[in-house]
Image: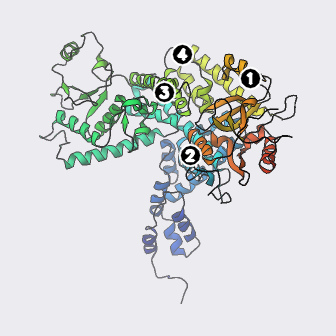
């Protein structure tokens, strides 16, 4: 009997191959099967090359793109999904190679990043998303109990350089998202706004870009939410067609509010009201946490309402944002609706602004945006103000600590504030959390939209940041010198006075960052003064501290400490990629990435000696006791 069935038509092979499920986990199992078919019989090869066979696999893998470039690909390949899939995979490889250059080559990062977002943008999003989901090393999985490694197989096959690869992929995703967002925000304050208006939904979705989220994902989520609302309202017998005799707009706007509340959308209470994330749409996309502030509720309500044919828009009403409802039927009156309360909509009795204001109980000279749709830029600045209030409230509550989350929120508010006529200074805390934004986002996108003086100021600040980063990349810190350095990057330490635990990510042979300390307190307290090594420490709660050598002592490498650092500070993956552990002696260290090994070339050997022999230089310090010379 022959090894194949020549009598089976190509169409039958194609029908069989059409049952291959699209892979949503980037495993490419089905695509590999199709590729293997190319080496089989002519009929099977012909079936596997058919465009429609590849369409579901293409659509499953590539959910993001630059729309103009996608249209060019469709034209170039005549809509053949197999050829388009091949083209995108080649583009993926080039993009990931470019990101790897950014990871491994410290000098020139800003220029490479700016070139990357221009060349690839959202065409590389899905490949970056896959890279950002690489499995973390075993020691970062599971619970946080016990000494690191107690029930973890440290010899398992971890992905090479997984943590720094994840970090830089996520960093580039954020860069793409923020560049896209700032381009839209720039239009809010330019003449282009009249030709290409930016919607309330688009403007506020951009806030999530500062958490490295795609604003396009927010829009897709709102579409799914609107679909669920439509289904529930239809099942409940609510008429959604404005042309139907049973259409009741005042009743519908209330029913939609009730439906969203039934899905969990409520006003946050207590301390949760001041969570800075309440202003960021991706945060209340999660079904487990849909409580937010009034503007967040108005954002969800207006975005869903418009998908259901209700012309809802935010107003600049004092105190809390209200929704303006503009009926499609010109015979009906406008309405003002409180999405957060229980009241019925206020139906305007007149088209005269002054009369309506008086009827509502407001002064007749108040601006129209109080009760009618306000400019999107106005609501965006209001969002920035809400964010700053929440950040400052949380800082006061935590005694002044500035977390990574607060830095991201502050950066979003800072970018919005750039469009106001004032001189804004980029703080080191803000730019430290998004290290590649200076040129690719701020200088290249925001700068040209500012007035000449503001543009010059921003350009000067961005160029200074780039110069400082380039100088940092060129500076190598040898351990030899007049001031011997005891500790090394990757050592887990605890502060003797303040008791925070963390990991050393850098050091100076003497204090070179006095502005990061409290001079009045520290200069009086330190026995060795400023003339001793100082260390940058990434703490378990996500803060970055600058501490004197005499204040630090090594501690056991506990899994909980390491995992909390990883969870609370994204930059952890930039600096570390593994662990070396002597379980019997409870000594260990975090393995530095290529970046830290380049900057501190002798520390890797010192760290290895510490784990194996317990020595630091010619000393053998004990655990949990301050080390001194």
Q: Secondary structure at mark 1?
A: loop
Can you say whether 29 is above or below 335 in the image?
below
Snapshot quadrant of residue 328: top left
Residue indicated by mark 3: 394
Residue 162 rendering spot, x and y as whole percentages: 64, 50
Q: Is residue 92 left or right of residue 183?
A: right
Q: Quadrant of the C terminus?
A: top right
Residue indicated by mark 2: 124
First-in-chain label (3 vs 4): 3
Distance from the alpha carbon under mark 2 to that under mark 1 = 50 Å
In the foreground, 351 or 625 = 625
Q: Secondary structure at mark 3?
A: helix
| Residue pictured at 49% horizontal, 17% vertical | 420
Residue 459 visible (yes or no):
yes
Distance from the alpha carbon under mark 3 to that under mark 1 = 30 Å
Distance from the alpha carbon under mark 2 to that under mark 4 = 33 Å
Q: Secondary structure at mark 4?
A: loop
Q: How is the image coloured?
A: rainbow
In the foreground, 614 or 383 = 614
In the rendering, which numbered label is found on residue 444? none
Query: Nearer the viewer's eye, disc 3 or disc 1?
Result: 1
Query: Nearer the viewer's eye, disc 3 or disc 4?
Result: 3
Query: Nearer the viewer's eye, disc 4 or disc 1?
Result: 1
First-in-chain label (3 vs 1): 3
Q: Is residue 371 left or right of residue 488?
A: left
In the foreground, 78 or 109 = 109
| Residue pictured at 67% horizontal, 57% vertical | 154
First-in-chain label (2 vs 1): 2
Residue indicated by mark 1: 526
Q: Secondary structure at mark 2?
A: helix
């Amino acid at each position: 009997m022959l090894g194949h069935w020549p009598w089976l038509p190509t169409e039958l092979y194609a029908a069989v191959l059409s049952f291959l499920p699209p892979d949503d986990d980037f495993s490419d199992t089905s695509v590999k099967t199709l590729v293997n078919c190319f080496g089989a019989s002519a009929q099977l090869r012909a079936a596997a090359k058919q465009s429609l066979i590849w369409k579901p696999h293409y659509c499953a893998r590539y959910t993001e793109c630059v729309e103009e470039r996608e249209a060019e690909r469709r034209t170039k390949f005549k809509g053949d999904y197999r050829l388009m899939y091949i083209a995108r995979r080649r583009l993926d490889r080039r993009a990931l190679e470019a990101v790897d250059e950014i990871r491994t080559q410290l000098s020139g990062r800003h220029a490479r990043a700016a070139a990357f977002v221009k060349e690839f943008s959202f065409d590389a999003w899905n490949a970056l998303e896959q890279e950002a989901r690489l499995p973390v090393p075993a020691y970062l999985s599971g619970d946080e109990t016990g000494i690191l490694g107690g029930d973890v197989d440290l010899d398992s096959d971890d992905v090479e350089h997984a943590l720094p690869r994840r970090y830089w992929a996520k960093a580039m995703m954020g860069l793409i998202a923020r560049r896209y967002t700032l381009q839209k925000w720039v239009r809010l304050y330019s003449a282009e706004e009249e030709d290409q208006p930016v919607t309330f939904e688009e403007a506020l979705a951009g806030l999530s870009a500062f958490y490295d989220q795609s604003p396009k994902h927010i829009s897709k989520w709102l579409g799914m939410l609107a679909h669920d609302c439509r289904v529930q309202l239809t099942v409940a017998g609510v008429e959604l067609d404005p042309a139907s005799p049973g259409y009741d707009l005042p009743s519908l706007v209330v029913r939609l509010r009730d439906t969203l509340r039934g899905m969990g959308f409520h006003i946050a209470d207590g301390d949760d009201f001041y969570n800075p994330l309440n202003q960021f749409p991706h945060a209340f996309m999660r079904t487990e946490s849909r409580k937010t502030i009034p503007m967040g509720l108005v954002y969800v309500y207006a975005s869903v309402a418009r998908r259901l044919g209700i012309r809802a828009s935010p107003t600049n009403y004092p105190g809390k944002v209200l929704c303006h409802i503009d009926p499609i039927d010109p015979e009906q009156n406008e309405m003002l609706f409180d999405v957060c309360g229980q009241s019925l909509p206020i139906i305007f009795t007149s088209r005269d602004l002054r009369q309506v204001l008086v009827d509502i109980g407001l002064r007749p000279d108040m601006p129209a945006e109080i009760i009618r749709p306000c400019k999107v830029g106005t609501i965006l600045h209001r969002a920035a103000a809400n964010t700053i209030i929440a950040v400052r409230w949380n800082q006061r509550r935590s005694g002044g600590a500035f977390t990574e989350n607060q830095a991201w929120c502050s950066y979003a508010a800072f970018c919005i504030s750039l469009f106001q006529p004032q001189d804004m200074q980029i703080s080191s805390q803000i730019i430290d959390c998004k290290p590649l934004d200076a040129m690719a986002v701020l200088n290249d996108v925001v700068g040209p939209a500012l007035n000449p003086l503001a543009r010059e100021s921003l350009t000067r600040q961005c160029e200074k940041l780039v110069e400082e980063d380039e100088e940092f990349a060129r500076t190598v810190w040898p351990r030899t010198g007049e001031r011997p350095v005891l500790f090394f990057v990757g050592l887990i330490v605890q502060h003797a006075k303040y008791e925070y635990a963390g990991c050393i990510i850098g050091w100076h042979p003497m204090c070179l960052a006095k502005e990061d300390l409290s001079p009045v307190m520290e200069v009086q307290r330190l026995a060795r003064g400023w003339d001793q090594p100082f260390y940058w420490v990434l703490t378990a709660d996500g803060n970055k501290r600058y501490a004197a050598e005499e204040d630090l002592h090594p501690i056991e490498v506990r899994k909980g400490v390491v995992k909390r650092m990883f969870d609370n500070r994204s930059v952890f993956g930039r600096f570390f990629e593994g662990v070396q552990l002597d379980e019997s002696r409870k000594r260990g260290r975090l393995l530095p990435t290529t970046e830290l090994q380049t900057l501190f070339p002798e520390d890797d050997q010192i760290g290895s000696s510490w784990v194996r022999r317990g020595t630091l230089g010619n000393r053998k310090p004990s655990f949990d006791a301050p080390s001194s010379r």
